[in-house]
């Protein structure tokens, strides 16, 4: 028996608390692949250890407990930025921060508990474990509005493997992660043929990634967009004594002539001005004047029928509002809370809402005309995390326009993970993206996920950049997410059928 197998069995023979701590440590190790670190080998090693513990566990209940502990360790580290929003107004919300991290990581870990337990119930092999993990991640992206942040496959975003999402979507990268981890364990356990073959396949996918979706550079006649990043700290953003200064800063950046003359489009971030849309006529006129005839897209709040919306508007070259989009996928407990109309009367509200009732959702995805730039798919902050929000567009856009306020996410990991997922969305659809963030990172991203221009985190400034062209619709854009979960479900069913056949219908 190989040393790694003996080590796994020895660990499982210890007291339950020891086993759970070991699994949690393996999960935390796997989380090192998330941005900004991007240590994807650590992700493979961590998941290899989790697979080993699951495979060598004697019962599905034990495997489920280990899966929960591994998930808790993984999400506690990768989502540690979740405490940041509660520290913006620490006097009021700071006490909630540790509870938010504990409940979020523990709650999301339940998906992994179900996956590990189910995989072990049908034999615990690599195929069953990988299929169950993919299905768990698919469910995590949809249940209770979904939260697909920090998927295992996101560890590959800063590598050539990223290009495969144009075929498989983000869940495909999670499947590759599971396959690579299981192959690594097999190799360490002395199963040379299975382990070597699996790792060879992963290596081939890594090496051939750039061939799947070649980068598309902008031509000499490409439209020019300007990124405007005011860098307003969240605790100062709505301060009446400072809000005017942040607005004037954006006006000054907008007024700059630029090296090649006026840009075709100027983009301000989410909730870029403190004045609500209903009372912003003079403010919008000042913005249009500063733009000197260029289109301006910006985030703004608006009221209608006693409801508050987080919106994006586009000012035409004549200064009139030509397009309006209301964010439809809101952040639970951030932009709204369940039964907000009632609870708002008692002072309970979403962290980001300026109203006790929270924001109301818009009607859904839409395309907006941008003149010579074509049609844009507008996204506001959190919506860029969900591939289905992009796929649900009523047609094919020429580019994705995302405005966000990442000041809520702090300065350590949250903004970089959010940016990484924006790159995923571009590659999935084969569309360039213009992403403007209040505190950064603002960027222009081409259809292959490369950042062609950026403004760093925590800096105020502006940047003109050419808008890269779109690629033809990718296989993922045509098929969506269903092939990978369908294949995972089939793999799990086949593993279960084989288990029943070889065990005479008995499961441990």
Image (tube, rainbow, N blue to C red):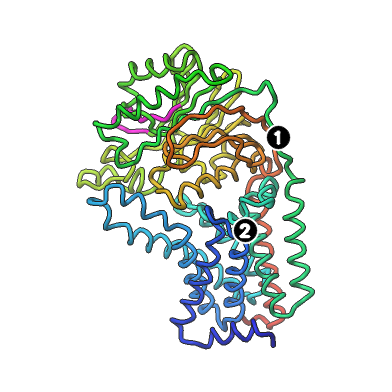
Residue 79 versus residue 259 in the image, above or below: below
Question: Along the horizontal axis of the image, is 143 left or right of 176?
Answer: left
- Does residue 489 show up magenta in the picture? no
Closer to the chain start, of discs 2 and 1, is 2
Q: Which residue is pictured at 40% across the width and 48% down the height?
A: 410
Q: Which residue is pictured at 57% across the width and 72% down the height?
A: 50
Q: For the residue labelled by badge 1, is the local secondary structure a helix, a strand or a loop?
A: loop
Quadrant position of residue 230: top left
Question: Along the horizontal axis of the image, is 204 left or right of 130?
Answer: right
Quadrant position of residue 60: bottom right
The chief SS type of the magenta part is strand
- Residue 480 percent coordinates (x, y): 64, 45
Q: For the residue labelled by badge 2, is the local secondary structure a helix, a strand or a loop?
A: helix
Circle on res. 174: 2
Quadrant in which the N terminus is drawn: bottom right
Q: Nearer the viewer, residue 86 or 218?
A: 218
- Residue 119 percent coordinates (x, y): 60, 71
Q: Which residue is mark 1?
A: 216
Distance between mark 2 and mark 1 Cα atoms:
26 Å
Residue 210 versus residue 284 in the image, above or below: below
């Amino acid at each position: 028996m190989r040393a790694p197998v003996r080590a796994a069995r020895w660990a499982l023979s210890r007291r339950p608390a020891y086993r759970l701590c070991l699994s949690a440590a393996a999960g935390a190790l796997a989380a090192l692949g998330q941005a900004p670190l991007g240590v994807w080998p650590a992700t493979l090693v961590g998941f290899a250890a989790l697979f080993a513990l699951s495979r060598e566990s004697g019962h599905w209940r034990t495997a489920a407990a280990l899966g929960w502990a591994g998930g808790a360790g993984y999400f506690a580290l990768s989502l540690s930025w979740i405490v940041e929003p509660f520290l913006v107004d620490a006097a009021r919300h700071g006490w909630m921060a540790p509870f938010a991290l504990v409940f979020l990581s523990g709650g999301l870990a339940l998906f992994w508990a179900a996956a590990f337990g189910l995989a072990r119930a049908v034999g615990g092999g690599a195929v069953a474990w990988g299929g169950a993990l993919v299905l768990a991640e698919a469910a995590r992206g949809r249940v209770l509005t979904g939260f697909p942040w920090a998927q295992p496959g996101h560890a590959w975003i800063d590598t050539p493997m990223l290009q495969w999402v144009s075929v498989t979507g983000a869940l495909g990268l999670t499947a590759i992660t599971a396959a690579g981890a299981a192959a690594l364990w097999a190799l360490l356990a002395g199963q040379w043929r299975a382990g070597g073959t699996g790792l060879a396949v992963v290596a081939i996918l890594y090496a051939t990634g750039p061939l799947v979706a070649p980068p598309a550079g902008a031509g000499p006649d490409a439209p020019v967009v300007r990124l405007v990043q005011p860098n307003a700290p969240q605790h100062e953003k709505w301060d009446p004594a400072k809000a005017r200064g942040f607005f004037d800063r954006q006006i000054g950046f907008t007024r700059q002539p630029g090296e090649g003359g006026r840009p075709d489009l100027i983009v301000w971030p989410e909730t870029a001005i403190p004045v609500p849309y209903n009372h912003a006529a003079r403010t919008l006129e000042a913005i249009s004047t500063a733009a000197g005839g260029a289109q301006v897209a910006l985030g703004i709040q608006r009221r209608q029928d006693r409801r508050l919306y987080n919106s994006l508007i586009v000012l035409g070259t004549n200064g009139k509002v030509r397009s309006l989009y209301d964010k439809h996928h809101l952040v639970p407990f951030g932009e709204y809370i369940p039964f907000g109309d009632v609870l708002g009367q008692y002072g309970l509200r979403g962290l980001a809402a300026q109203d006790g009732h929270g924001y109301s959702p818009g009607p859904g995805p839409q395309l907006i005309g941008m003149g010579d730039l074509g049609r844009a798919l507008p996204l506001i902050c959190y919506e860029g995390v969900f591939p289905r929000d992009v796929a649900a567009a009523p047609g094919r856009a020429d580019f994705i326009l995302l405005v966000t306020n990442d000041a809520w996410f702090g300065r350590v990991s949250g903004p970089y993970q959010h940016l990484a997922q924006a790159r995923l969305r571009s590659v999935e659809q084969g569309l360039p993206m213009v992403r403007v963030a209040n505190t950064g990172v603002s960027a222009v991203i081409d259809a292959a996920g490369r950042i062609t221009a950026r403004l760093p985190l925590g800096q105020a400034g502006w940047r003109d950049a050419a808008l890269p062209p779109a690629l033809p619709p990718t296989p993922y854009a045509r098929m969506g997410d269903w092939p990978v979960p369908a294949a995972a479900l089939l793999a799990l069913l086949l593993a279960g059928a084989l288990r029943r056949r070889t065990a005479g219908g008995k499961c441990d």
